[in-house]
């Protein structure tokens, strides 16, 4: 069984075999795929009239991939906006919430933190604008050692 994404050629094969009246299990055996992969493909990409058209399926798949959050890339302009608020000593959570409310940018606070730590690794100082970064941590000797007491 293959675990890679369904190809254009496989979509045309699915369409042809469905027109011949083959069931999903037969198509899956023919393509050496799990039948759930074929069911998923047909259900995701069938047209309103119930027919499976491979060209439309290809277009729909490409569209879903292009708009998926995983493929979203933030520009330097986007991060410049985020850094402006960081320099105003806003927290990543505040920045994320504000930009989403104003409709300027949809960015998660985790993404902002990743940018901050990446900047620090590159020698930057964005991390200094985090609220907890000025605190000096004090070691508490013996506080974690419960053995032998």
Image (cartoon, rainbow, N blue to C red):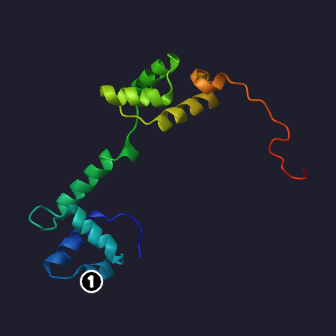
Residue in the foreground of this view, choosing between 91 and 26: 91
Q: Nearer the viewer, residue 62 or 42?
A: 42
Which residue in the rendered view is the most extreme toward the left? 49
Give above or below for 53 relative to 143. Answer: below
The answer to whether residue 105 is above or below residue 3 is above
Name the residue: 33% across, 28% down.
101
Q: Is residue 104 visible?
A: no
Q: Position of residue 135 (x, y in %)?
A: 68, 24
* Residue 104 image position (x, y, % from top left): 32, 26
Q: Which part of the image, by quadrant, shows the N terminus?
A: bottom left
Taking depth in this image into account, of 5 and 117 the one nearest to the observer is 117
- Residue 137 point in image, percent of width and height: 74, 29
Residue positioned 36% across, 78% down in the render: 32
Residue highlighted by disc 1: 26
Classify residue 33 by image quadrant.
bottom left
| Whether residue 67 is visible | yes
Q: Is residue 134 left or right of residue 92?
A: right
Crowding at mark 1 (Cα within 10 Å: few <14, some 14-19, many 20+): some
Q: Which residue is depicted at the point 37% across and 45% down?
A: 69
Residue 134: give x, y in percent of width and height: 66, 22
Residue with the most extreme top position: 88
The residue drawn where x is 23% and y is 58% is 58
Q: How many marks?
A: 1
86 horizontally vs 57: left or right: right
């Amino acid at each position: 069984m293959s675990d890679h994404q369904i190809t254009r050629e496989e979509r045309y094969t699915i369409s042809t075999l469905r027109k011949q009246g083959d069931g999903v299990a037969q198509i899956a055996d023919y393509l050496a795929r799990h039948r759930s992969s074929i069911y998923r493909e047909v259900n995701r990409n069938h047209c309103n009239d119930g027919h499976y058209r491979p060209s439309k399926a290809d277009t729909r798949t490409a569209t879903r991939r292009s708009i998926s959050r995983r493929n979203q890339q933030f520009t330097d302009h986007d991060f410049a906006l985020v850094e402006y608020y960081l320099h105003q000593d806003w927290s990543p959570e505040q920045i994320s919430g504000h930009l989403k409310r104003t409709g300027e940018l949809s960015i998660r606070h985790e993404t902002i933190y990743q940018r901050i730590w990446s900047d620090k690794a590159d020698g930057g100082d964005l991390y200094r604008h985090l609220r907890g970064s000025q605190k000096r941590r004090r070691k508490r000797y013996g506080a974690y050692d419960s053995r032998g007491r």
